[in-house]
Amino acid sequence: AAEKCDGIVDSMTLLETLVSEAVDSGVPRSRVVLAGFSQGGAVALYTGLQQKQQLAGILVMSGYLPLQGEVAAKFVDKEVKEAATKTPVYFAHGEADPVVLLHWAEASRAFVEGLGVESVSWSTYPGVPHSVSPTEVADATKWLTERLPALSSAEFQALRKTAPVREVSPEGDVAVGE
C-alpha cells in the first residue's frame, strides 16, 4: 500500500510561501532554516529537500522523511538535486521515542545520505521519549548557530526594517506584525 500523508503538500505549500515572503522582504535564503518537531520535522525535511535553491539548513527533531519516493523523484531536476545536496540536515531523536520510532529516523537519515546530501548530522538521546531534552536543545542551538552566524548590529537593523514578523497558528492562519 502506498504511504499516505494527508495535508503534507498543503503544508509544504504554506512553508514555501512563508520562505518566499521572507526572501522577498530581504531575508537571504542563506539565513533560512526549516525546522520542526515530529510532524513538523517531517514537513520541514520533505519541503527542504525539494527546493530549487539552497537553504541554511533543515533541523529535524523526532521526525522522519515521509514519501521518500516522491522526494527521490524530484532529484531528476538538476536544480533541486544541487540545492538539496548542499543544504545541511540535522537529525536529533530520543532513543525511547514510542511515537516516531528511532529506526524510522535512522532509515530517513540513511535515505538522505543516499541522496547525496553532503552534510548530514545525527544525534540521539538515551532515555528521551517523544519530547526534547535540554541537551538536545543545546545541541540544536549549537548546530543552528554554526549555520546562522550572528549579524552585525547594522545588518540586524537593516533586516528588521524589511522583514516583518510572521506567526503561524496551529490552524495554519498567518499573522503579520512588528
Image (cartoon, rainbow, N blue to C red):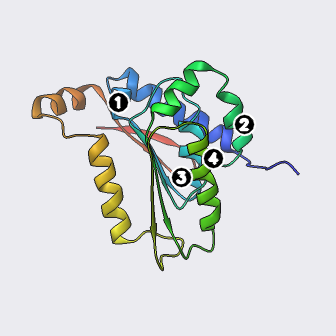
Asked if 85 appears above or below 90 in the picture, the reply is above
Question: Which residue is painted at 12% across and 34% down in the image?
Answer: 152
Q: Residue 15 in the image: x percent, y percent?
A: 53, 37
Residue type indicated by callout 3: Gly
Task: Find disc 2 in the rendering and name its residue.
Answer: 70
Q: Residues within 10 Å of mark 1 (few under 14, many from 20)?
A: some
> Disc 3 vs disc 4: which is toward the camera?
4
Q: Which mark is residue 41?
A: 3
Residue type indicated by callout 1: Ser
Q: Residues within 10 Å of mark 4 (few under 14, many from 20)?
A: some
Task: Find disc 1 in the rendering and name its residue.
Answer: 30
Q: Secondary structure at mark 1?
A: helix
Mark 3 or mark 4, earlier in chain: 3
Dot 3 and dot 4 residues touching (CB under 8 Å): no
Dot 4 and dot 1 residues touching (CB under 8 Å): no
Q: Residues within 10 Å of mark 3 (few under 14, many from 20)?
A: many
Question: Which residue is painted at 31% across and 41% down in the image?
Answer: 147
Distance from Cα at disc 3 to Cα at disc 4 = 15 Å
> Disc 4 vs disc 1: which is toward the camera?
4
Mark 3 or mark 2, earlier in chain: 3
**Residue at the right extreme of this rendering:** 1
Q: Secondary structure at mark 4?
A: helix
Mark 4 or mark 2, earlier in chain: 2
- Where the C terminus falls, by quadrant? top left
Q: Which mark is residue 111?
A: 4
Using the image as rendered, state which of residue 67 and residue 72 is in the foreground: 72
Dot 1 and dot 2 residues touching (CB under 8 Å): no
